[in-house]
Image: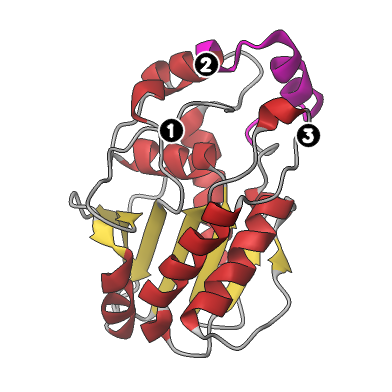
Amino acid sequence: MPSSFAVNPEPVLLGHVPALAADSARTVLVLRHSIRESLRAGSVDPGLTSEGKKLAERCGRLLSGLGGDVLFGASPRRRTRDTAVCLMKGGGFPLQSVRECPELGDLTIFSRPVDFEAMLRTHNTEIVMREYFSTGHAETLKDMRPFAAELLAFLTETPFPTARAVFVSHDVLAMSILSALGVRAFSVDDWCGYLHGVLLTQGRNGDWTAAYAVPDYDAGKKHRLFV
């Protein structure tokens, strides 16, 4: 795990991100996607609900102060790409092609991608994740600390073309980073909310600070797994 990360123990409102970015050399924001259709309908790649689109556009407005030179990226899922587009629309950002980032996909936490579908078939997701977030380990999943280090390396060492980047990913990735860095400890009973995520800001001295980014101060709002 990188040793140069400082930790902001207080949640940061999305509306405060533009001001923090203005004082930072680089800013990387990783958000969970917005409210999606039910996974119980049989698809592992559902789209956003109408409520989810409105929420993402509202969060885009909160980020509008980031300016026009912002990279938007997403995992290879429809719900993340659609969230990124809604963020751009809501914030009045120039529309751009969303950069596809398989490094931030929901399969990356699995030692083997096929284990994801196996977990869905056995309906033991909550059991696996409860163990993972209480111990940092679970069968078929990568250990939390090296997994978080892998994600952080991609987010902070990749030479993105802009100093400000917004990525839309998945709850388990954001939770792994925040838990491994000691920003916030999560459990299955305190699940990461929609449009919640990780704010990484790099100071002028090169050091990074990590914080828990939320649309509002209801940072503990629970969302049941795979509804």
- The quadrant in which the C terminus is found is top right
CA gap between label 3 and label 2 equals 18 Å
The amino acid on which the numbered mark 3 sits, given as a three-letter code, is Ser
Which disc is residue 122 wearing? none
Question: In terms of sequence position, does the residue under pointer 3 or pointer 1 come before the other?
Answer: 3
Does the rendering let one see residue 60? Answer: yes
Answer left or right for 145 relative to 147.
left
Q: Earlier in the sequence, mark 3 or mark 2?
A: 3
Q: Main secondary structure of the magenta part?
A: helix
Q: Earlier in the sequence, mark 2 or mark 1?
A: 2
Q: Is residue 125 left or right of residue 163?
A: right
Q: Is residue 178 above or below residue 39?
A: below
Q: Are marks 2 and 1 in contact (CB under 8 Å)?
A: no
Q: Residue at x 45, y 16 (%)?
A: 130
Q: Which residues are magenta?
A: 109-127
Q: Position of residue 194 (x, y in %)?
A: 46, 47
Q: CA distance from mark 2 to mark 1?
A: 12 Å
Relative depth, front residue between 198 and 142: 198
Amino acid of disc 1: His
Residue 43's disc is 3
Q: Nearer the viewer, mark 3 or mark 2?
A: 3
Judging by the rendered image, the residue that carries numbered circle 2 is 126
Going 41% across and 23% down the picture, which residue do you hit? Answer: 188
